[in-house]
Amino acid sequence: MAQYIKICFILVIAYTYIVGGSKNKSKNKLLVNRETPGPGCFCKLNGEVDDCQCKVESLDSLNNDQIYPRMKSLLSRNFFRYFKVNLHKECPFWADDSRCAMKNCAVEMCTQDDLPFGLKEEEDKESENKYIEKAQSEDCPTKADVTLGDIDTTISKESQQAFKDWTKYDDAQETFCELDDDTTGNCDYVDLLLNPERYTGYKGESPHRIWNSIYNENCFKAPDQSGYNSQSLTEKTLEGMCLEKRVFYRMISGLHASISIHLSHEYLFPASTCYGTEKWGQNMEEFLRRFDHEQTDGRGPQWLKNLYFTYLVELRAIAKAAPYLEEEGYFTGDDEEDNAVKEGVLDLLNVVKQFPNQFDESKLFKGNKKEAQALKEEFRDHFRNISRIMDCVGCDKCKLWGKLQVQGMGTALKILFSGDGMGPQSTVKAGSKQKFQLRRTEIVSLLNAFGRLSSSIHAIEVFRRMIS
């Protein structure tokens, strides 16, 4: 009996050692995946972000501990939750033959009763201006009423169109994306909290055509590339491209990765039975399909790392525009709400300004001035074209968030190449509004786009814990 007890005791010790050892090995393996190259999705999420001097670990800490909770609170406020957008534009590149009819693709527009007082007043002013224009056109003075001392204040249709063309041209000189003309009746306010970015079921040829058009026709190519394929771009081929072209690609790739993370993190699971209900949640299988080292031929982890590059660029834009944003009123007509938004923005900007390892835009477009200017114009034209491609998205909810995030990124680029100079210490001040201005839609899209990147980095940590 004693011998039997002894044998059992030895077996228990051995089992404990084996299980405990395997758990420790598993933990060590996860630790290795985070800190050194290896298999999995997260093998490149360590060390310096490409073409920057900031470490991934520093951004994880900054975002998850300080930025993300502040952004989540701030973007729930009325000033940032209502976004004015035109979802009725026709695709300028191909026939719009792939409209999504699924219920999750639909966008719920705001009515006048839904809007805060300040935004409702803005809408009323636009309607009032239309009525005034109509009244003026109906009551134009006759020739008999005009005397030599009168000033003819009527403007011909040709002149009105010319003014619009001049304004459009002036805007194009400083913006990196096409902004919707929110003075027309084609734009609607959308409550972003009621229309969150998540998986809608929009898939297949239509979204593939969107991304192929972005990468194949608008991203820069390596010197030895006859065609373009985002899947074939590696760090080795990127080395053959100049910094500006690498920046362009990494920003688009980072945006693409961020959107893919959102779709995996807010995935719609079908009902398990006929009487069950659909559920939203994290889909680890979908996340691995998009980013796992083995399932993406080794490219997925680099796509995740490009997200951190895009995050850094937009973080720097917000830091540069801090003096300008600090002077904004953030008016919605509710004093208590507006004061809370202002306090939230100031709190966020204090955190952003204190981060030391910012992206340095002064390294871009250097060298021969003529060549640098030509490259900058090409850079701008490519990005503006991508903003136009967003009107070709067949899913309205995907189009909404695509337009918002591309516009936010375009606003970030506009800020980076404006102000009193370029470099870590340069800023854009409110006193320079004669030369530089941000419309409300640009501020809303800038902060919401950055909020999407912030939520993606936070979601990466969620998936990391799920795997562990």
Image: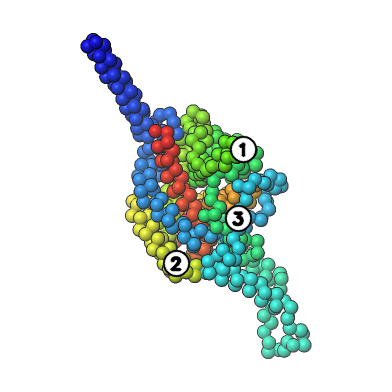
Tell me the residue that label 3 is attached to: 108
Residue 274 falls in which quadrant of the image? Answer: top right
Is disc 1 placed on a helix, strand or loop? loop
- Give the label on residue 274, or none: 1
Tell me the residue that label 2 is attached to: 338
Residue for point 56% across, 68% down: 120
Residue for point 52% across, 43% down: 280
Q: Answer with left or right where residue 79 lies relative to residue 28.
A: right
Q: Amino acid at mark 2?
A: Asp
- Label 2 near label 1: C-beta < 8 Å? no
Between circles 1 and 2, the one closer to the viewer is 1
Quarter holding the N terminus is top left
Q: Answer with left or right where residue 61 lies relative to residue 280.
A: left
Distance between mark 2 and mark 3 Cα atoms: 25 Å
| Residue 328 versus residue 245 in the image, above or below | below
Residue 108: x and y, percent?
60, 55
| Residue 15 versus residue 256 in the image, above or below | above
Of the numbered discs 2 and 3, the one sitting upstream in the chain is 3
Crowdedness of circle 1 by 10 Å Cα count: few (<14), some, many (20+)?
Answer: few
